[in-house]
Image (cartoon, helix red, strand yellow):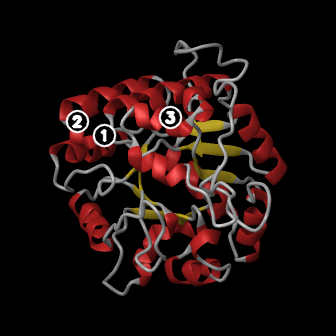
Amino acid sequence: MRILDAHVHLYPPEINRDPAGWAAAHGEPHWALLSTRRRRDGRPVQSFPDAAELLRELDAAGIERALLLGWYWEQPASCARQNRFFADCLRAHPDRLSAFATVQPAAGPAVCRAELERARDEGLCGVGELSPHAQHHELAAPGLEEVLAWADAAGWPVNLHVTDPAAGPYPGRIATPLADFRALALRFPGTRFILAHWGGLLPLAGDGPTPANVWYDTAASPLVHGPEIWERFLRAVGPERVLFGSDHPLHLYPRETGSGLARFVAEARAGGADAAVLGGNLLNLLGPAGRSVRPSVAPHSGDPGRSPAGPS
């Protein structure tokens, strides 16, 4: 059975070397708050692997391919840097990695369109992870409307961050009302949305039927839900709408060492995840564009053939 991870983050080498310092210098306080915090026992909430380390983690967990998601950066320049880095990663590992582009919709329609077109030319195949609520713009902002309409025309899926309303407080938590995502999906019926983190359990909220253009990934599930969420959600929604995603390099099981990827795969299987959930649904959403990179794309930095992410 092929296993694909639909929700993985990977950062450029300068971010890995000094996450807090880079964030302070580049106007990314929200990312710093979320990614550099520590748990009560002093351990960090995540690691900062390079591409080679990521691939070793995937191999150890039996995961064939990972979809790299950008962050919901506050600055357009951060988005552009992330996308160029992903282009290098795809050139180095077209058989193991796919990637979505990130944008800051508050930058406006022209900036977003130009960035998405460049990302498409570089082999990226979707949009996200975005978070209108954390990126400080309205859902009706022209930039976001441009992004969603562009994605519809291009056939690109769009991954949106969703915070479970019932999740406990943590530093950097931003509320993301579930009604907002239902409204977006209805306003853009041709755009295929992937709502991260089980979509905050949107289809279980009892607020009416979920639009047909919505899928859900399982990122960070063990940090919010028990293993029983798999059977409950799959029974209510159906396996055809669920994508296995980890949120790597977030440490999924805080009481254990390591990433927890292998344990999460086992949890998914035990919970009833079938071949569609573990990879087939993602392949269908990505299509051929998500499985390879155009060989004509030139590298943007360093020598990605050795290690696009460089030293940690």
- Residue under the image location 25 percent in, 51 percent down: 136
Q: Which residue is mark 1?
A: 104
- Residue under the image location 39 percent in, 41 percent down: 28
Q: Position of residue 128 (x, y in %)?
A: 42, 46
Q: Which residue is mark 3?
A: 21
Residue nearest the observer in this picture, 288 or 245: 245
Question: As drawn, is 212 to the left or to the right of 65?
Answer: left
The 10 Å Cα crowd at callout 3, few under 14, some 14 to 19, many 20 or more, is: few
The 10 Å Cα crowd at callout 1, few under 14, some 14 to 19, many 20 or more, is: many
Q: Position of residue 278 (x, y in %)?
A: 67, 60
Looking at the rendered structure, the secondary structure element under dot 2 is helix
Q: Which residue is mark 2?
A: 107
**Mark 1–mark 2 contact, CB under 8 Å?**
yes
Q: Position of residue 193 (x, y in %)?
A: 39, 57
**Mark 3–mark 2 contact, CB under 8 Å?**
no
**Which of labels 1 and 3 is toward the front?**
3
Which image quarter: residue 166? bottom left
Instruction: Identify the amino acid type marked 3.
Output: Gly
Q: Which mark is residue 131?
A: none
- Name above or below for residue 183 compared with residue 123: below
Which image quarter: residue 118? top left
Instruction: Identify the amino acid type marked 1.
Output: Gln
Looking at the rendered structure, the secondary structure element under dot 3 is helix
